[in-house]
Amino acid sequence: MRNRRKRPIIRTHKKLTDMLADKKHDDHSSLRSNTISMETSLQQKKQTEKCVGELNPVLHVVVDRVKTLLGNPMDLIVREFEFELENKVTATLLFLEEMNDTQVLNEFILSPLMTLSKDKQSSPVPVDHALHYIKQNALALGRVLDVETEDELVEALLAGLSVLLVEGNKKGLKLGTNGGKVRGIEEPTSEVVIRGPKDSFTESIKTNISLIRRRIRSKDIRIDKYKIGEVTHTDVAVVYLENIANPLLVKEIKERIEEVKTDGLLESGQLEEFIQDETVTVFPQFLNTERPDVVIGNLLEGRVGIIINGTPFVLIAPAQFIQFFQSSEDYYMRYDISTFLRLLRFSVFIISLIAPSIYIALTTFHQAMIPTTLLFGIAAQREGVPFPAIAEALVMEITFEILREAGIRMPRAVGVAVSIVGALVLGQAAVQAGLVSPAMVIVVGITAVASFAIPSFAVATSARLLRFPLMLISSVFGFYGLTLALIVIIAHLTSLRSFGYPYLSPFAPIQTQDLKDSLFRFPITKLFKRPEKLSKKNQTRTQPYSVKKKREEETTR
Amino acid sequence: MKTIKIDIQQFFILIILFELGSAILVGLGMDAGRDAWIAILLGMVCGMILFLGYFYLYKQFPEQSLTQYLQILFGKYIGKLFGFLYLMYFMYLAARVLRDFGSLLLSAVFVQTPIIVVNGLMIATIVYVLKLGFEVLVRTGEIIFSLVVLLGIILAVLVLSADLMKYNYLLPILGKGFLPVLKAAFPVTPTFPFGEMVVFTMLFPYLKTTKKSKALTVGLFAIMVSGFILSATVAMDIAILGGHVATHVYFPLLAAVAKINLGEFIQRLDALVVFTLIIGGFFKIAVLFYVAVKAIQDIFGVQEEKRLIGPVGIVLILSSIVIAANYVEHITEGLNIVPHFIHIPFQVVLPSLFIIVFLIRRKKLKPFASSPSTSTE
Amino acid sequence: MKLLKSCLLFSLCLLFLTGCWDQNELDELSIVMGIGINIDKKGNLIVTYQVVNPTEVAPGITGAGGGKQPVFTVYETTGRNLMEATRKASKQTSRRLFFAHARMLVFSEKIAKDSIYQAVDMISRDPEVRSTIQVVVARDTSPSKLLRTFTAIDKVTSDEVATILKISEKNWGENMQQDINEVLQSIIDEGGEPLINGIKITGDKKLAVTAQNYEVGNPARVQLSGMGVFRGGKLQGWLDGPEARGVLWIKGKLVSSAITVPCMENDNGYSIEIVRSNTELSADTKKKIPTITLDVFPEANIAEANCAVNLEKTSEILKIENKLNHVIEKEIQKTIKASQDFNSDVLGFGELLYRENPRKWRNEYKKNYKEIFPKLVVKVNVDSRIRRSGIRTSPFLFEKKKEAPK
């Protein structure tokens, strides 16, 4: 691939499509060569843009070119027909079959056009005015735009629009007839709540935007669109509230998105990696959600949402560490239970992070700290176990990771079988055979359950990854090593920034006002400020002088 | 270069963590027997006076650190010489605390581990954190602070509910007269940990505050708070363990907490204390470490502080080991030699000298001191 | 890349270092529950370790070969000092002796009479032994025998003794828990001396050391037996029964107990249950021989009344209170007398004098405390309050008496 760069620049479209096809074959090639081919294709694209001018007024030439450009795909429908203006005019409707709503095509485009007759026209329409005329009079469709270049034409076709070409015109019309099958709005699968809205984002960016718009009827909402991916041309939308979000933040996010150069963007995770601040970290720097209400909640706090076509997971930036322990439900339930749950989730995170390390440190270094009776129990179980505690723990943890991965990949029906084999056969048998101690099984079990109780999958993964080094270090240095490692983790967290906002805020640096909605959730009437640094210009959320107070005053009067 | 800014509450936390760091675990002022807590309060008052002195110097040179304004006060060469002495002092302090800390860990938990490994691990952690920047250390301090406060509250509640304290152990107050207390209080207790506030002369310029007086009150308040905490802790140790035992164990706090036993279930809480020990030691060494790096930067005009961190770390590990042949020697030095011949000159004598020199040369120096741009190289 | 390399190097180091230094797997440790110290004729220490066999103690664990092995084993070594003896033990055991969970330290009477100072120092210096370890003296038996005795409820003797001490202090009050720390502190206290609980074996002593001890109906048992009085680190004698309870009265440590109070002609008329008690000490140091005043405020319930008295009358209750005061006062005076006879200030009066008047203590009393202590005048005032009389009012004996003459 490397030497391709030295080749003379290929100018014809055919070669370009060849190249693209070529590239597909080379899918297995390394990332590096991929980027190079991307660069070359970029250069070529610029070239093609230069040579492709306006559309050829001769219909079949254009159609042929489109066919060659797209490699004459079987789903490209070329519908030639005639309609009547001054004279009979030949027209062609081009579209990719599965991406368009054929019913709309038939009812609102083909049928009105084909029923046009000279008699109804007040004055004869010349051919070169045909487009303008039918746009005004025949096409019963909302989105009708001009197409002037071949590139635009192809792009429109690929985006799922249909294109109407009329013989003798240098322009075409692209028609918003896109349709085809998309997944409907369903209940969220990864963020289930008991109380709260039950809809979730889908793969279609349009649906997603509509879900947001429906909830936030503000004139200040801004939705800016980008296309990312030299090949995939994925739609990306940046959503924010103009009167709340910090303009510098919005600008920064937009700039970073514009800078992304890649061939394809399939999921928000990829974009996340492109635009995050720090690469060498296990902690997520974006919040992702499939719940529209979460997005709205964050927009109201001055954050920015990034929607990517083709995935139901919307990114929210900047993210703070504490957000990963909050669930949208926290705001729908009473504040007392929400606070309790948040504290619980946080301790669960700590447990899933350090439970095995603590077990190892206690049993191999600090036996003095275990209550006597418990020590007897653990010692009795350890009796006859052939491995040192660290090996035992590593084996169990890795086994668990294997089971978990297997459980996800397996078809649902087999998944049950895996858990039976895992839990009953492996666990029970390993304990009975004296390979591992029951206490270790309990510890690993707690760790596992704990990691599932964290609302954010992303943070649960960080805990999963960090667990292993922590186990190693506490097996060598006991609590001393563990404490130092935790300090390192805390320091790392404080050094992280998500779009310039400290990751551990509001804890470090401490922001007293924001602490009210962090590990705790104060009653909603007390949360009258937006996060301090996110929304500099528009801080007040509710009037501190709440309805309740007013009511009280009235009654006292 | 990005300038570091510490806001006022971070400053408060920094002082408290620094003061409590290692002092809360070792018995302070224990020469005074059951009146140790009074000795600490006395030490605290002296510490506050010293702090006033340091702050006075800072007020005159609001933009410069100690090693920088020494060069203004005394001219380039003598100033650098004094600065170099202070650099040595900071390094020595850091190495000392590191040694203290390593030895304590060794005698308590890691009997067979070589001290170089224990100290090396600590320094490695500090190097990592400092490479992320001093601001990260300060912010880590904020998190650590809330953790320590939480642990402190838990411990206090447990101690109170376990009903371990026998207040008789604290009586009679001043039983041997005031003299032994004074003897215990001077000169050791003011110098450690309160006099070590001299380190902050290097950190004052980072203060992000419009009102200097506010920084002063917060600083004094922080010293007071840490003094009261230390005093209360020592009093608690004595009330639980009795005067003799409390004064004759290496870590009274550890021994006191070990006695907590609530319903045979909440017991053996030494882990919590060990945790605080490590955190406190970490923070104190890290601050001293950073100050040393800063001093090197000022004296030798090194631009990049990050490149200094690694080498200084290695020097610290080695010097923490060669500083004394054994723990007894180390402790004897610490109790008899260091306070008189090292702490007092560096914490009291030299700063007073600087103030006097400043007052004498005040008129000449005025243009330097007031212009902020003199040393922001 | 650099980071990756150093991480890799670091974890490699970690892997290779595993198993070094201070790491001990649980199955490499012998958990010592009790330490016994005796002295032989040559002056060598005989140290006995009671080591638990966790598989037999742990609840619900049926380990390999469960149920057949004894719950604990005992190792015994001799050496010139504790360290030597401990290290010598490795000739007998396959595991490292681990002391952090030891709950009982037993001195033999012999070493107690000789001197306990050396042993106390050794134990309190060891970083592993916890300061909450209970100190006892094996009375009329040896530590070795005591530690070999099988007990029925708490399977490990040391555990059993420590628990008995705790329960007995709370419910009967003739013994008080004395951990190594308290012993040390009472040695150091001004003029103070330690008091150490005595333990003896009752029942069939031969049976005690066999596992059959579980199976017979009337096994040998370990039992608390008085408190040993020391002077200068040497055991002087024992305080038994009420004399020992007097110590707890004086120290204000008595939580609950039962006291018998006579009623009319019946010596066992009432059984009074002490519910809580408070003691205030003060000293008058004006004279050459100081006077100490003890104010004891017990609160009590009537638990039994074998006596025809009308308990609904306040005057009767007052009468009982007076009698109770008298009984308690006598008990306390007896204790004081005993300790003065031993000339051992186990009651902490020296510390009290120091607290009240430090200067005079240092200048006058301290030097000749040995002469002053036996002459100390102690005034005991007991002011008890009877709060309740169980769930009955007057005893039926009283009702019967009321009806009889009519």
Image: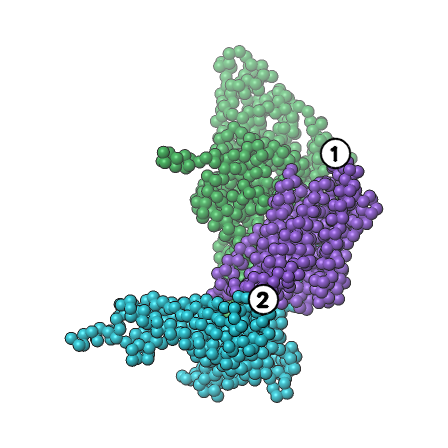
Chain colours: A green, B purple, C cyan
Q: What is the CA distance from the residue labelled 1 to the residue labelled 2?
A: 106 Å
Give the residue type at disc 1: Ile
* Residue in the picture at 62% in, 31% down: A155
> Is residue A133 among the parts visible in the rendering?
yes
Q: Position of residue A280 (x, y in %)?
A: 67, 48
Q: Residue most toward the front?
A: C287
Q: Quadrant of residue A48?
A: top right
Of the two numbered discs 1 and 2 in the rendering, the one whose residue sits closer to the viewer: 2
> Callout 2: helix, strand or loop?
helix
Q: Position of residue B266 (x, y in %)?
A: 50, 63
Q: Tell me: residue C54, above or below residue A106.
A: below
Give the residue type at disc 2: Arg
Disc 2 is attached to a residue of which chain?
C
Of residues C259 and B134, the one drawn nearer to the viewer in this rendering? C259
Q: Position of residue B22 (x, y in %)?
A: 65, 58
> Callout 1: helix, strand or loop?
loop
Q: Is residue C204 left or right of residue B120?
A: left
Q: Tell me: residue C363, above or below residue B337.
A: below
Q: Can you identify the residue that label 1 sits on?
A: A10
Query: 10 Å neighbourhood of mark 1: few (<14), some, or many (≥20)?
Result: some
Q: Can you identify the residue that label 2 sits on?
A: C359
* Residue in the picture at 46% in, 42% down: A523
Q: Residue most toward the right?
A: B77
* Residue in the picture at 58% in, 76% down: C368
* Residue in the picture at 46% in, 69% down: C293
Q: Position of residue A57 (x, y in %)?
A: 64, 21
Query: 10 Å neighbourhood of mark 2: few (<14), some, or many (≥20)?
Result: some
